[in-house]
Image: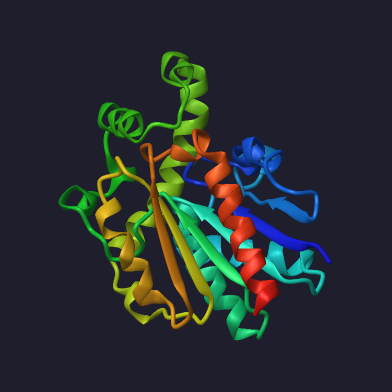
Amino acid sequence: MKHQLFLLHFAGGSMFSFDFLKKYLSSNIEFIALELPGRGKRHNENLLKTLEECVEDYFNQIKNLRNGNPFIIYGHSMGAILGLFLASKFEVINDNPSHLIVSGNAGPGVKKEEEIICYHKLNDIEFKDKLKELGGMPQEIFDNEELYKYFAPIIRSDFQCLDNLTLSNIESDILINTDIYAIMGENEKTSSNIDNWKKFTEGNFKNKIVPGNHFFIYDCPNEIADTVVDCIDKFKNN
């Protein structure tokens, strides 16, 4: 019986954003990287502008791919936030994930002063500076105007979904039963707030801090893979 692993990309990412991870996982895990409209294989579809639309899109994708086996939702950065709301939506239909793995994000409600700014409304220079600060994007995208013009609207759209959440109180109403495992890079500004995730679950909570910045996942694929295996082993032993 293969455990299904559904992966949710970061802002500006696609299903290909997790290609680096697949080779570190056992063939006994069904690796399913998803993507939102407007990028990758879905580049001809309209970009989504709200968190609710993104969650609904992912929900329908996973629902169509479910096979009755246990499943894990793993999201990085934006994907972590979407994963929380997605887990809640699956609990409503009594198809609970065995675990929610979140990385590169301290969870809803952790607001640094600068996060009050709506990133998607920044002018082009400020927006580029913010993207460079976050990392994860090759320098050639910034150096190639054509490439940048392709990716910028996608990333702005994704940030718009997150900005709307930051400015709302929607996160105060969410509480899941699914176990949460959180991972962050030690150089991330909000890594000291990683325990914030604990308040969103009535299940078990674990966390770990690893070397690196917001995109530590590319330098620590074994850490992610080991976390997935730990979650599967725990499920089997329950």
Residue located 27% across and 26% down the image: 125
| Residue 89 image point, x, y percent | 57, 77
Q: Name the side, left or right, on which 215 lies relative to 18.
A: left
Q: Farthest residue in the left direction?
A: 113
Above or below residue 108? Residue 225 is above
* Numbered disc total: 0
Quarter occupied by the N terminus? bottom right
Residue located 65% across and 73% down the image: 235
Quarter occupied by the C terminus? bottom right
Above or below residue 81? Residue 210 is above
Residue located 63% across and 78% down the image: 96
**Which of 32 and 70 lies nearest the eye of the viewer?**
70
Above or below residue 216? Residue 86 is below
| Residue 66 image point, x, y percent | 77, 68
| Residue 178 image point, x, y percent | 54, 76
Q: Quadrant of residue 108?
A: bottom left
Visible residue check, residue 50: no
Q: Name the side, left or right, on which 57 lies relative to 143.
A: right
Q: Name the side, left or right, on which 119 lies relative to 83.
A: left
Q: Quadrant of residue 17?
A: top right
**Which of 48 and 87 lies nearest the eye of the viewer?**
87
